[in-house]
Image (tube, rainbow, N blue to C red):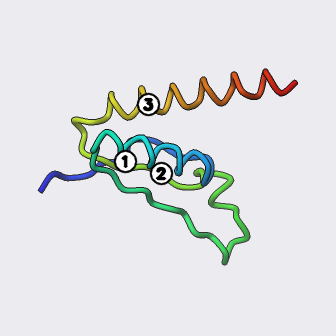
Amino acid sequence: MEEFEKILVLNNEFEAELMEEVLLDKKVPYGIIIREDSALGGIVELEEGWGYLEAPERFREEIMNIYKEIQESSADSEKEEV
């Protein structure tokens, strides 16, 4: 079994859902780790992000490209709304 490594920090649940949808479609193995911080009132989430995505190292470039595309399409959508 391949070892999973931290690939990228996710900012929110919306990003996580989009990444999950694409990675499932492309059959890329992954895990999404959510930082639950109810005891500290969300301080950890502010400093370290909502959560992170982990996967085998050999998928790093593909995952980063997918994430970049999602970020760019999100930015384009925000521009159209203004």
Q: Pick whichever, 30 or 73, lies toward us.
A: 73
Crowd band around label 1 with a 10 angstrom C-alpha radius: few (<14), some (14–19), many (20+): some
Q: Which residue is denoted by mark 1 in the rendering? A: 6
Q: Residue at the spot x=33%, y=29% of the render?
A: 62
Residue 74, by quadrant, is: top right
Measuring from the top left, give residue 78's x and y in whole percent. Answer: 76, 28
Measuring from the top left, give residue 53's x and y in whole percent. Answer: 42, 49
Crowd band around label 3 with a 10 angstrom C-alpha radius: few (<14), some (14–19), many (20+): some
SS at circle 1: strand
Contact (CB < 8 A) between labels 1 and 3?
no
Query: Residue 52: which numbered mark, if any?
Result: 2
| Kind of residue indicated by mark 2 | Tyr
Contact (CB < 8 A) between labels 1 and 2?
yes
In this view, the residue farthest toward the bottom is 39
Q: Which residue is denoted by mark 3 in the rendering? A: 66
| Residue 29 to residue 64: above or below | below
**Which comes before the other along the chain, label 3 or label 2?**
2
Q: Pick whichever, 40 or 66, lies toward us.
A: 66
